[in-house]
Image (tube, grey):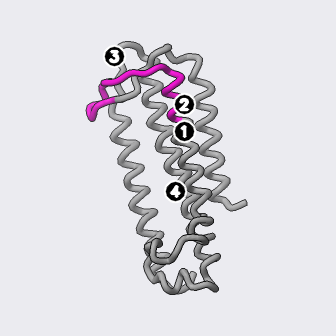
Amino acid sequence: MRASHIALIAALAIAAFQLAYFYPQLPPVVASHFNAAGVATGWQPKALFVGILCLVYALFALISWAMPHLIMTMPPELIHLPNKAYWLAPQRREQTAHVLGDQMGWFGAVEVGFVTCVAQLAINANLMGANANLGPGLLFVTGVFVLVVIVWTVQLYRTFSRTSL
C-alpha cells in the first residue's frame, strides 16, 4: 500500500475518532453554519451534522481512490495535463495513473485534515454554549490549507511538465 493511501486512511481514522468521541458531548442541535466572522448563523440536529461530515469524508476518499481508475478509462481529450501526449501514451498511461493516484491520495489526506480541523473548531464552538463562535482559528486553518493546495498544485504541474519521472 502506498504511503499516500496510508496517510488518507490515517486522516479518516482520526476524523472517525473525533466524531465518535465528541458526538455524545454535543448538544442535540448544533451550530453548523458560520459567517465570515465565525459567528453561528445556522443550526441542525447533531446527527445530521455528523452525517454530512461522514459523507464529505467518504466522498474525498472515493475521489482519491477512484482517480487512477478513471485515468485508465477516460479518453485523453477529457484529461488536462501538461505534456498530455507523452504522459497518456499507452506505454506510460499506467505509470501516469499511479502517479496521479498517489498525488490524489495525499490531496485526499489534506482535504480530510482540513475538514477535520474545521469540524473541531465547530465542535469547540458548540461545546462552549450559546455564543458559538469559530474564533480566529478558521482563518489560520484555511490559510494553511490554501498554502498546501498551492504547493501541491505547483508540484503536480512541475511533475507533469517534464517528460520523465
Side (left or right) of 39 relative to 19: left
Above or below for 62 versus 132: below
Name the residue located 56 percent from the left edge and 51 percent from the top edge: 109
Relative to the observer, which residue lies in front, 69 or 86? 69
- Give the numbered dot on residue 131: 3
How much space separates mark 2 and mark 4, taking CA atoms?
22 Å
Q: Which residue is at the front of the view, 21 or 48? A: 48
Location of mark 1 (residue): 55
Residue 82 within the magenta-colored segment of the rendering: no
Amino acid type of the residue tagged 3 in the rendering: Asn
Q: In this picture, which residue range is highlighted in magenta? A: 34-53
Q: Position of residue 159 (x, y in %)?
A: 49, 76
Q: Residue furthest left?
A: 37
Q: Name which residue type carries label 1.
A: Leu
Q: Earlier in the sequence, mark 1 or mark 4?
A: 1
Q: Quadrant of the N terminus?
A: bottom right
Q: Is residue 38 magenta?
A: yes
Specify whether 139 is left or right of 20.
left
Q: Quadrant of residue 105?
A: bottom right
1 or 4: mark nearer the eye:
1
Crowding at label 3, few (<14), some or many (≥20) Cα neighbours within 10 Å? few
User: Residue 74, percent across and down?
Assistant: 54, 71
Task: Tell me the number on the disc at residue 107.
Answer: 4
Amino acid type at circle 4 is: Phe
Quarter containing the C terminus: bottom right
